[in-house]
Amino acid sequence: MRIVRWIVLAVCALAAGQAGAQVKSIETLSSRPDRVSGGAALVQIVDLGATPAPVTLNGADITGEFRSGPPNVRTGLVTNLRLGANVIRAGGATLKLTNYPISGPIFSGPHETPFVCTTDRFQIYSALGRPPAASGETFGPALDADCSAKTKITYLYLPKGGADLVPLPPGPGLPPDVATTTTTAGKSVNFVVRVETATIDRGIYQSTVLFDPTSDTEPTWRTPPRGWNGRLIAIQGAGCTGGWYFQGLVGGSSASMRIGAIDASLFSVARLGEGYALFGNTLQNASQSCNAVLSGEAAAMGKEHFIKQFGVPLYTVSVGCSGGSYGSAQPADALPGLYDGILIACTFPDPLTIATSGGDAHLLTHFFDVTAKARFSEAEQLAISGYKTPKAFLDAANQFARADPVPARDDAPGYKSAVFNDVVPASLRYDPKTNPKGARPTIYDVARSVYGVDPATGFARRTFDNVGVQYGLQALLTGEITAAQFLELNEKIGGYDDDANYVAARSVGDAGAIGRAYQSGLLLGGGAGLAAIPVFDVSGIYNDDGGYHYQWFHFALRERLVHANGDARNHVMWRGDPVPFDKAWPAFIAWVEAIHADAAPGSAREKTLRDRPAALVDGCWTAPGVFTAEPQTFSRAPSTACNARFPSYGYPRLLADGPLAEDVLKCRLKPVDLNDYGGHLPAELLPRLRHIFPAGVCDWSKPGFGQTGVVPWASFGPAPEDLVFDVRRGR
């Protein structure tokens, strides 16, 4: 009875305290309140008076978890959150939190299956570039079906005069050859790096930051590492072919990745020495997770984890080349606030664009090599495809393989269908004859929770659609092909079935999948998070002769920003082969710093536009050390100095009169009109053209079917307990 009375009195006292002290706001600092993971959240309370109000979590007193900072502001790491709904109350204010397991998922949909654990094969230093010599240390065995492993904290150091980090030997002190470094914050510290390796969202997460375990206080959000300059960099990975059904073997900054002319490992060491912290997840590497929704989720959870450990960064930027370019751009757009700027190279808007343009080119190579063999000259083929060289045409066509689930397909030279990483057992792999229930290695099937599943086949719905596309239209209008060739081409081009086999009929994209490609950002839009941050494109690889890193992809991204926002003033492009990265990085980070320092009123976009340094303008590097400042434009003609040095070439839908943005997955149709052909189509052939296009031809002046902007922070699957998100409402 006495104990019960004490509890009643305590509750009454707590209620009285809440009534007497009021709170202005309660907010999470580590993540959105509806996207908390791992059972903890960094929370800030702003009091209205000098007396702090008591704080409860699900009715239990947690006032003691908060510490005062600026006047009337308290911050605390709230732990022991239960899965699903939680409520924090203080002084009349309420904050609802939704907590998810550290293994995810949160908004990417049900876990990908199958999923091969690789913690026992992951070298914990591989994410820093070249693994340190004689260091084969792996993460360790997986402990459960979610591929979890015991977190490891290890240390590296930079030897005096060295360029690569090496493992810190065990012992109470530091080696005598440890270098020192001075950070951008002016702190001189030993060049010792703390490496955390953990599992988050079923991927392998790593963070790195300057920290001396022999002298520094154990880092927490209250006591961040002395060598950290308060800034955070997300390091992205490579391209997506093979990026499905396994946990991953390398982090973002693998040794094979280059940013401009800079080896990523050298970039990482340089930034660490300046005090930046780096983080990434194997699932942010598109070569291991070709699903931008899942990659964005892993990045958001990783950033959240970092904040709860070290504190809120002043800003977070993302850096990447090739697959790392869309690994930066797509989450930045779909998850506003995740990144405060992106520095990208070897740019693509997204892998769906690569596959879509590759699908057109692949149909064309089949038509030229099989259906109409020897009836179109090399020059005519290039005029229709838009590419500079036969190799460039073929290389682009072969990128359709990332949408082809059938193994060992005999097709064009260099075509490699159904690419898997070797760690995925053959018994799990799809084969239409021997294993029809196996995992399908395509960009669609790996994101089946986004695109949706066809119940009749069990396959992911697909977006490829070429109904109404007039292949070779520009070549007809310029007289490079005849009307007879134009008609034969469009009559016999055909399409694909669900297994990417050639079929006579044109492909019809699934309406739901098309809509979700836009809503999810799997087809980059550019009108959400990407509209409000610096986007600096430094080319990296410009090779229109082959290799499929073509210039038009860079301009397609810029055009999408224009379509979504009216202009692309927050996008700066430097062309060059390569761009000097030692000049690009400081120019980019000066822009981000200026925005961070801008305390004047204005939206994030307004600050991004007004704070761009005057010297940071479009241009190209025409020779070592020679920069030509001029607007970068898509042109094959030598109309400017940069276009004379770097002429741009097209692709099939652009030559079919489609938009440079390549953002229309399914076009609206209009009736066939003889007047559209400028006298290059004889009137007597009009009935045949109408027979080829009975529903009409593409009307590129209109938005595409289902074309809409990205839904920020959309969810594509079940949430804990009774909370279900709906992509249509963007909840």
Image: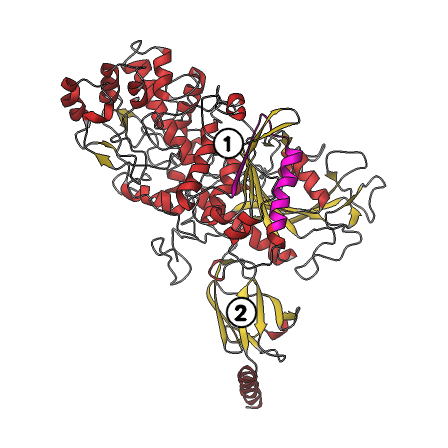
Asked which quadrant contains residue 580, the reply is top right
Q: Is residue 584 magenta?
A: yes
Residue drawn 47% across and 43% down? Answer: 330
Residue sitting nearer the eye, 568 or 584: 568
Q: Residue 147, image x and y in percent?
A: 52, 46
Residue 430 seen in this snapshot: yes
Residue at mark 1: 632
Q: Quadrant of residue 536?
A: top right
On screen, residue 564 above or below 377: below
**In the rendered structure, does residue 449 fall within the stretch colored magenta?**
no
Q: Is residue 304 left or right of residue 214?
A: left
Viewport quadrant of the C terminus: bottom left
Residue 694 left/right relative to 263: left
**Which residue shows up at 81% across the image and 41% down it?**
178
For the residue marked with disc 2, what is the amino acid? Ile
- The range drawn in magenta is 570-594
**Cα–Cα gap, marks 1 and 2:** 46 Å
SS state under label 1: loop
Q: Secondary structure at mark 2?
A: strand
Asked if 307 appears above or below 553 in the picture, the reply is: below
Q: Nearer the viewer, residue 183 or 423?
A: 183
x and y, in percent, of residue 500 in the image: 32, 28
Judged by depth in the image, the label closer to the viewer, 1 or 2, is 1
Residue in the picture at 27% in, 29% down: 469
Labelled disc at residue 26: 2
Q: Residue reaching furthest top?
A: 374
